[in-house]
Image (tube, helix red, strand yellow):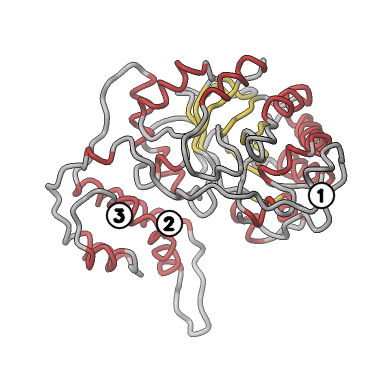
Amino acid sequence: MQIGPFEVTPPVVLAPMAGITNVAFRKLCREQGAGVYVCEMVTTRGIVERNPKSLRMIAFDADENPRSLQVYGVDPAVVGRAVAIVADEGLADHVDINFGCPVPKVTRRGGGAALPWRHKLFERIVTAAVRAAAPSGVPVTIKMRMGIDDDHLTYRRVGLIAQEAGVKAVALHARTAAQRYSGTAHWDAIADLVSVLDVPVLGNGDIWEADDALRMVAETGCAGVVVGRGCLGRPWLFADLAAAFAGSSHRVMPSLGEVAQVMRRHAALLVEWFVTEVDPRGRITSEHHACADFRKHVAWYLKGFPVGGELRRALAMVSSLAELDDLLGKLDPAVPFPESELGHPRGRTNAPGKVALPEHWIEDADSDEVPTGAEMEHSGG
C-alpha cells in the first residue's frame, strides 16, 4: 500500500483513538509489527494557538516512520494554517483529517462524521489542507464514515471530492454516525468506494482478528486496513497481522503471564512518556499520572481470563509501578489465552442513536459556511 511517498508493508494502519494512541501505546504496538501508527486526534485550533496540550500530543519517538498525525477542524482557514505549521515545521510526515468521529460534542458543532454532509465545506477544508501540505511534500489523507445515517449517505460523493482535491488515500469506517459503534460494519460500502476511486481505499470496521483483515481485503479489494478497537488490550494483534499478510498462519496466544509482561511494559512506557511534574507539595507525579492513564487498559488486557473481581479492581486502581508489580505477581502465569474471546468486539459498543447536529444542518447541504462556534478550543474528542 502506498500513501504518498511511503510504502506501507504490511498494509496496516493503527486508527487514532482519543486517550489511547499516545507515544507509549504506539511504541508498544510498533514493537509487534510494522505499519502506520497514528497519534491521537489533535484539533487544528489547538495547533494554530500553540496550545501546550495539543503540542504535547504531537509527540513522536525518534524511530517512528512515518510520523502520522490526525487533525480535526471545521474552519478551512484554521485547518490550512494548522497543516502548514505541521508541514513547514516538520512536525509530522503524514496528515490525516478526521471526518468520522460520531461523538455528540463533535457532531453537534458540525464536525467529524457530520461534516461531509456539507460537501462544499468539506471540499474547502480538504483543499486547504492539501495546498498547505504540498510545498513540503506531506501527504494528506482522510478518514470518514458512510454518512450521517442510512438516509444521508455521503461516502461516494465526498470520496470523489477528496480524490479531486489531491488526497493520497481515503479510509472508510463502514458504519454511519448513527450506528456509532453498534451492529455490523457494512463492508460492501468499502467495496463500493474501491470501485469508485483511483486512490487507495483503506477499510475500517470489525477487524477483531488478523484473518478478518485478510477477509476484508479479499471481499472488498481495499488497499489496506485500519485497526481500532480490535487491538485494545491486544497490541500483539499487529504481530498477527504482519504474519497474516506475509502468508503465515502463526497467531500469538499469550498466557496470562505473558500478558502481565506486556501490561508492565505498557505502564513503564507511559511513565517514560508522561512529563515529570511537581505538585504543590513538592511530590513528583509523573508515575502516578501514567499509572492512572494505564488503568483504562486493565479490563481490556484481562478480558476473558479467570481473574477474581478483587484483583481486577485493585489493578484498575493502581498508582505506582511497584504496586503494579505486586498485583501482577498475584496472577497465575500458566493460565492459557482464552480462545473463546477471539473474534468478539472489544472496547466501546453502544446502541445506535440520533446524531446531534447543528440547527438546519440537513436542510442546508449546499452551504459552505463554517457553523457558528464550530471550532473546538483544545484537543480531545
| Residue found at x 82% / y 38% | 365
Q: What is the secondary structure assignment of the residue under circle 3?
A: helix
Displayed quadrant of residue 32: top left
Q: Which residue is mark 1?
A: 360
Amino acid at the residue labelled 1: His
| Mark 3 Cα shell of 10 Å, populated few (<14), some (14-19), many (≥20) | some
Q: Is residue 223 left or right of residue 336?
A: right
Q: In front: mark 2 or mark 1?
A: 1
Q: Name the residue at the bottom extreme.
A: 281
Quarter holding the N terminus? top right
Q: Is residue 148 left or right of residue 322?
A: right
- Residue 221 shows which numbered tag? none
Measure the alpha-carbon separation of dots 3 and 2.
Answer: 10 Å
Mark 3 near mark 1, Cβ–Cβ under 8 Å? no
| Residue found at x 81% / y 36% | 128
| Residue found at x 45% / y 50% | 348
Measure the alpha-carbon separation of dots 3 and 1.
Answer: 50 Å
Q: Which residue is mark 2?
A: 270
